[in-house]
Image (cartoon, helix red, strand yellow):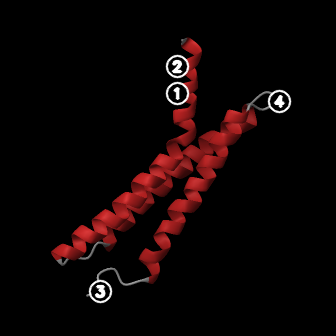
Amino acid sequence: MRNQDRLLSQMTLAVAPLLVWAAHFFFCYAWTAVACQRGSDPAVVLAVASVLALGAALALLARALRLLCRAAQPVRLIFWVRFASAALALAAIAWTCVPMLMLAMCVN
């Protein structure tokens, strides 16, 4: 039973960056819809949320890179998965921010 508990915690840490991206993605579109419906500008809140999400993903990437560098040879697959998911999440969060920078938010 203990090995199963360790596996669950390791997998949760491996997908944590992707969960940060998913939460950021959902929040950006939900907040834009709510703010535009109210007639306000969502840009400031979205910028803060994006900076926080990028910071969280960057911190998870740094932690994964540190674990990857300190791992004994041969490196376990879970360390590579943590690094790859953090890098993917960082790119996905940055890509989610692109429409905010290029398009007008609330166009009637």
Q: Position of residue 63 (x, y in %)?
A: 60, 40
Report whether 80 appears left or right of 33.
right
C-alpha span from label 3 to label 4: 54 Å
Residue that numbered label 1 is attached to: 9
Residue that numbered label 2 is attached to: 5
C-alpha span from label 1 to label 2: 6 Å
Q: Amino acid at mark 1?
A: Ser
C-alpha span from label 4 to label 2: 23 Å
Q: Earlier in the sequence, mark 4 or mark 2?
A: 2
Q: Position of residue 48 (x, y in %)?
A: 37, 62
C-alpha span from label 1 to label 3: 44 Å
**Residue appearing at x 83%, y 29% in the figure:** 73
Residue that numbered label 3 is attached to: 107
**Residue appearing at x 49%, y 74% in the figure:** 98
Q: Amino acid at mark 4?
A: Pro
Q: Amino acid at mark 3?
A: Val
The answer to whether the residue labelled 1 contacts the one labelled 2, judged by CB atoms less than 8 Å apart, is yes
Q: Secondary structure at mark 1?
A: helix
Say the numbered circle drawn on residue 21.
none
Residue that numbered label 4 is attached to: 74
Of discs 3 and 4, which sits in the foreground? 3
Q: Earlier in the sequence, mark 4 or mark 1?
A: 1
**Residue appearing at x 48%, y 67% in the figure:** 96
